[in-house]
Image: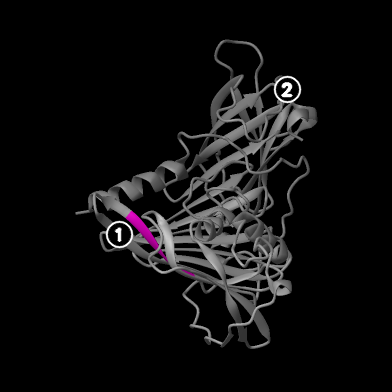
Amino acid sequence: MRSPTRRVALAVGVAFLLVTAGCLGGTSPTETSTPSTSEPTPCTYDTSKPTAAATGTWSPNASVAQYPPGVADNGTLSNASTLVDAHFDETANQTMALRYESSGDDRVRTLIHGPDRTPFYSTYAETQDGERTTTEFYGTGSLDFGRVVLPNETLHVVSQNTTTHVSAWTVYDEPLSGPQGYVNGLLSGGNYSVNGTVERGDRTFVELTTDEDSLEGGHYTNGTVLVTPDGVIYDVDATAVQSTGEDTERRLDVSMTLDTDIEWCGAPSWVGDVPHLSLSIVEGGHAVEIRNTGGTALPANTTFSVAGHDEPVWKHRIHPSSDRSGTVTTDVRLEPGDAVYVTASVDGSEPSFALHDDPTRGEYAFGAASVRGGNESVGFRLLTGVEEPEWAE
């Protein structure tokens, strides 16, 4: 028998994969050109905990000139956000792997990217009721991929310009739920000040520490940060003190590590295990193209819910109103490189949608379109016709 937690996790996974509900808030603007059909380079990343680095040689001496951004002349970390911004600015064009871990509840997050922020690969793993669940996300900026690995099955989602509803980091610079928000919380929640320097290999770090057991519940204490003078944070170790009731508290060990000596090899290997469907408006706006740009074939008899919008939609608009909606079902396999075309009627209270093997010009003019569908293991959330309003630019 499946535990309640197992059943809930599975239900959530199936819900977002079958995409029967949810928002269409976007993550990036739609390109009108057809995405590249090149296959991703298969690779697998090691997201296990790195071998503990050497402690290094500590010195009590640290000059003001060595203080990283956000640290005041008196040695206190006066602006954690400034330091976090410097860290992500400095590593934006550097191959890196960031690992965030909370040992008390056995939760681990990782973020990996190459010389640019996009594409990036992120993971989230946790254990509940003795069962380990891992969610993964590979983001390219428009066509993104998610995977949920449960003890006995694996589920996938492919999305274009829409949210993916997975626990891994899906937006790089989200101030609260993205990696910057997590690192900022580690630093802003502690009373850090300079405690000398550490020489480790060919790097010099400024060491920041917190006063032991000097903070109220819900903050970080016993903290140590190793950061370069230009603001790159390589190690954070701290204890999160959480109030659990009157005169009671819970303590969790929390850490962040940065590895800049890794090799970026592109999309993780599992991305090639699913059809890479993309959506675009063609035929002067009178048809929507669903194209398989790579990966595996889309099985026949796959049903999609299609929604048409008279005007382009804003990428951050939640639940964009649909001017007409319906369903279409494929009748043949859609191999990589193949495409089908959706048209819609104009008249009638129940608009009619049709699926064509070749480009066809329909009556209805699409300003934007969204497609949802899938099967038991792969779901699709695709949106095209996205633009920023002038006031949001």
Which residue lies most toward the top here?
Answer: 348
Colouring: one colour
From the viewer's side, name the closer residue of 17 and 296: 17
Residue at image location 71% in from the left, 33% down from the top? 385
Which residue lies most toward the left here?
Answer: 1
Residue 85 is labelled as none
Circle 2/circle 1 CB separation < 8 Å: no
Q: Main secondary structure of the magenta part?
A: strand
Residue 207 vs 69, above or below: the answer is below
Residue 337 within the magenta-colored segment of the rendering: no
Q: Position of residue 245 (x, y in %)?
A: 25, 49
Q: Residues within 10 Å of mark 2 (few under 14, many from 20)?
A: many
Q: Secondary structure at mark 1?
A: strand
Residue 239 within the magenta-colored segment of the rendering: yes
Residue 365 is labelled as 2
- Residue 70 picture quarter: bottom right
Q: Earlier in the sequence, mark 2 or mark 1?
A: 1
The amino acid marked with disc number 2 is Ala
Label 2 – label 1 distance at C-alpha:
58 Å
Q: Position of residue 32 (x, y in %)?
A: 77, 40
Q: Which residue is mark 1?
A: 250
Question: Which residues lie in the magenta part?
Answer: 237-242
Q: Is residue 87 left or right of residue 163?
A: right
